[in-house]
Image (cartoon, grey):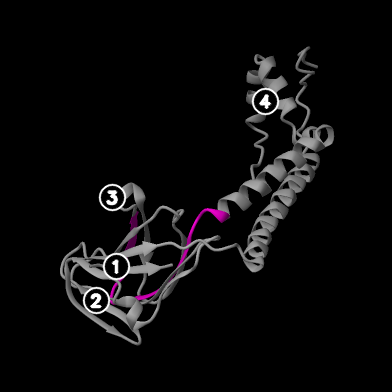
Amino acid sequence: MAQEAKISTQRNPQTAPDLVRILRRCPKFLQFVNRLDDSSILRDRPLSIIAVGLCLFAGLLYSFSDIAVVKLKIGTSSSTIFKIYWASENQSFSESNSKAIPIYRRKTNYTFLLTDISAIRRLRIDPTNRAKTRVRIESLELFQDGFEPLRIKTQADFRLLQNRNEISSRNTSSAGLTIVSAGTDPQLELRLEPHRVTSTLLTNAFRLLIAGGLLIGFVKFVTKSKSTTSANTPPDYGLATPDGLSER
């Protein structure tokens, strides 16, 4: 019986007159462009910018709360692809429910997003996609807000990983789990039983820090767009207002 783990553009003055002649035939297009002018949007609709920023902030908080983060420490004899599949109790593994990352010989630490683990009961780990390749998994950790962290680090933890396919040799030690692939599709399986916990203050503070940093970046981008638009006022090629086009 399987054990379960808890867990910037530049204008060309030579081509601009040609563009002007084309745009003179498109008054509706010019009206549309003028309405999208960054400086006017920022000047006339500051509340819209604030609303967009707040929606972005809230969306980021929600996103980070429902996605597991994987921290992987792994070594390999040759560059390869590491994949994780996930499935519910009676679900088959599929490519649509998987995450693949490249693994390199001279890099051992990797961090990536996975999915919401609340309904996941099985993980399939494909350490490599190459035959006769030695891979050593030193640690595998999953973190998601509202759940106990899943940590696979000790010899007892690694014994929870069951061989599924094309593993020619396997050795568990204090350094981690070392396997040698027999073919191009070696597989290990881990059964999960996620346990819900109350979100900690530290976790919420971390989420606020990330979302706040991205929000500040958004505000700086908008502000820079405004100053760039003001500094780069286009030359006057004899264009009149969109409603009454005329040439000088």
Q: Residue furthest right?
A: 43
Residues at circles 2 and 1 in contact by the CB criterion of under 8 Å: yes
Few, some or many C-alpha atoms within 10 Å of disc 1 (few <14, some 14-19, many ≥20)? Answer: many
Chain-order first, disc 1 or disc 4: 4
Chain-order first, disc 2 or disc 3: 3
Q: Position of residue 124 (x, y in %)?
A: 30, 61
Few, some or many C-alpha atoms within 10 Å of disc 3 (few <14, some 14-19, many ≥20)? Answer: few
Q: What residue type is disc 3 on?
A: Asn
Residue to which mark 3 is pinned: 90
Residue to which mark 2 is pinned: 179
Callout in the foreground (1, 3): 3
Report helix, strand or loop for mark 3: loop
Chain-order first, disc 2 or disc 1: 1
Chain-order first, disc 4 or disc 3: 4
What are the residue bounds of the magenta stretch?
A: 65-86
Gap in Å between the C-alphas at discs 1 and 3? 23 Å
Q: Residue at x 56, y 51 (%)?
A: 63
Q: What residue type is disc 4 on?
A: Pro
Q: What residue type is disc 1 on?
A: Pro
